[in-house]
Every structure is written in structure tokens, then in C-alpha cells.
Amino acid sequence: MEYKSAVFDDGERTIHYKTMGDSTRPLILCLHGFPEYWGAWRDLMPLLAERYRVVAPDQRGFGRSFKPQGVSAYQTRNLVGDIAALADHLSADKPFVLFGHDWGSAVAYAFSFWMPQRLKALVVANGVHPYAFQKAIIDDPLQRAASQYMTVLRGSDAAERMSKDNYARTLNMIAGFSATGWMDEEARAGYLEAWSTPGAMEAMLNWYRASPVVVPPVDQPAAELEGKVPVFAVDPKVMTVKMPHLVIWGNQDEALRPVCLEGIEQFAADLTIKQVDGSGHWILHEQPQVVASTLIEWLSARGMDT
């Protein structure tokens, strides 16, 4: 099977995506994170495409998709709107499986909160529920320290810093989150091409700038943050996952520590967590066979493979 390129353009947005698998099969829509592009799913797509139609878009600001200017263009409502429009184009009449990794998980969670009727299931790999993540950053010193990079990426000079010396800092950031033995020359070239698209790095960083997640300095007392954390002001009922939910988690993740999973069960009645030893944040690249087999078995057990 081959990766097939396509473009969705509704006059408001232009989204490039790759697809694999028979178009008559159930849809799995896959959302990458930072600093990736559709290639985050390159190793996984062939393993799922025998049973499913797998679609992996370049999200807004990334790769070959459109890159609107301004931080507000990257607010959650706009990111979810893109996926809703693409999903209606791909599977207007049938619910589908939404699978997110890293920042793609943030979009996937928000989509599941706002449009639960569109989903069969929500799947997340090393991504975080917004409330659990924010609570971990506030309460857990190690997670707060691990999240300080977000403040750096929100800086006005971040695009220049992350692009300098042929994207050396961006490559180093990837290596800092977990093992990168998977990044051969072909994979590296794909990332460099995606990052080099005009306006891409600034647009990618706008995801961080538009996010309501608060990352306080490591030494700021939690008591000083009372009433200043937007996520905590949201009714928890709004952040409930109403469909079956699978979380696949590489335990060696240096960016998102296991504490990020604490309390997630209160937001998902039908929750399965599969923890994977020997893998970190880039689990889609590190252990695609494990991810694929876990997902296929879980969907099959729930009758979601047809």
C-alpha cells in the first residue's frame, strides 16, 4: 500500500493530508503534535490500513497545510473547526475513531467534548487531558519543571531560535523527550522539509501562544495561582469523554510524566490505559507495532472494526 496525498479546501481552510487503506473501511483520523506533521504516523499507518481507512492531516500551521497569521487563529475552537470540517468531508454520515498524539491529543480531547456524537472512540498516545495536565503542572514539581520549555516556545524570538543552525534546537528538543533511534536520514529530511515551509515555525509556535495552559515558574507557590488558571474555571462536566477512550502511554516520556494520567478516570467512564515500557514520548515511532496491535485489539473487542 502507498501513502496517497490529498488536499481538502472549503474556501476557509486548506488542509493537506495523507491517506492509506480502502475508503469504504472505518475511518481513523490521526492528529499529530509539535514539532511534527503527518509524518508522525508514517510507521503506524501501514499497520492499520489493512483494516481501516487511515487519514493523517498536516494540522493548521504545519507542513503543507494553510498557515493563517496571528495567535488567535490557533485558538482551540479554530483547530477543532478544521478537524470537524475535514471529518465531514471524509465521513459525513458515520462516526469515526479520532486518534491524537501530543498536541494532536489536545485537539482530539476538545473535539470529543464538543462533538461527541461524531465519534466512535477517542484514542490518545502520550497526550494529556487538559484538566489532568494543568493540575500536574501546578501540583507536581517534576512536571512543572518538565513543562518549562513551553514558556520558552512562547517567546517572541522562539521561531528564530528554533530555526537557527538548520533547526538544531528543534532536533535537540525531540531528542530531549525520548529516544530518537527511529529518526533515520529519510525521517530527518521529512522534518526539515516540513519546518522549512515558509511561515511554518512561527505558525507552529502559535499553538503554544494560543493555549490557555498556565506554566508558572518552578518556584512560584501554587497558592498564588488561585483564580488565575483558566482550565480550572471550566465546569468539569464540559471536559467529559462520553465515548470509549483508550490511552496508550510510553512510560519513558521526559516531557509528560506519569502524573499527567492521575485523575483522568473521573473524566472518562469507559477508560482503558495501556502503559508501554521501553518507550517514551515518540511512541508512534518507537513502538508502532505495539501501538497498532493495542489499538486493533481494543477496537475489535468493542465491535468497532466494521
Image (cartoon, rainbow, N blue to C red):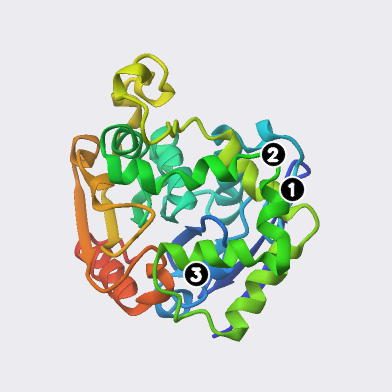
Tell me the element at label 3: helix
Q: Is residue 64 visible?
A: no
**What residue is disc 2 on?**
156
Evaluate if marks 3 and 1 touch, with contact meaning CB atoms under 8 Å apart. no
Of residue 269 and residue 160, the one placed in the foreground of this image is 160
Tell me the element at label 2: loop
Of residue 55 and residue 220, the one placed in the foreground of this image is 220
Mark 3 or mark 1, earlier in chain: 3
Q: CA distance from mark 3 to mark 1?
A: 21 Å
| Disc 1 residue type (three-letter) | Lys
Callout 1: few (<14), some (14-19), or many (20+) C-alpha neighbours within 10 Å? many
Quadrant showing the C terminus: bottom left
Q: Is residue 64 left or right of residue 204?
A: right
Q: Residue at x 55, y 50 (%)?
A: 87
Q: Is residue 248 visible?
A: yes
| Disc 2 residue type (three-letter) | Ser
Q: CA distance from mark 2 to mark 1?
A: 18 Å
Q: Is residue 218 left or right of residue 164?
A: left
| Disc 3 residue type (three-letter) | Trp
Q: Residue furthest top?
A: 227
Tell me the element at label 1: loop
Q: Residue at x 19, y 46 (%)?
A: 270
Single out the mark in the foreground, 2 or 3: 2
Q: Residue at x 57, y 56 (%)?
A: 90
**What residue is disc 1 on?**
67
Callout 3: few (<14), some (14-19), or many (20+) C-alpha neighbours within 10 Å? many
Of residue 297 and residue 212, the one placed in the foreground of this image is 212
Q: Examine the image and state in which quarter residue 273 appears.
A: bottom left
Mark 2 or mark 3, earlier in chain: 3
**What residue is disc 3 on?**
41
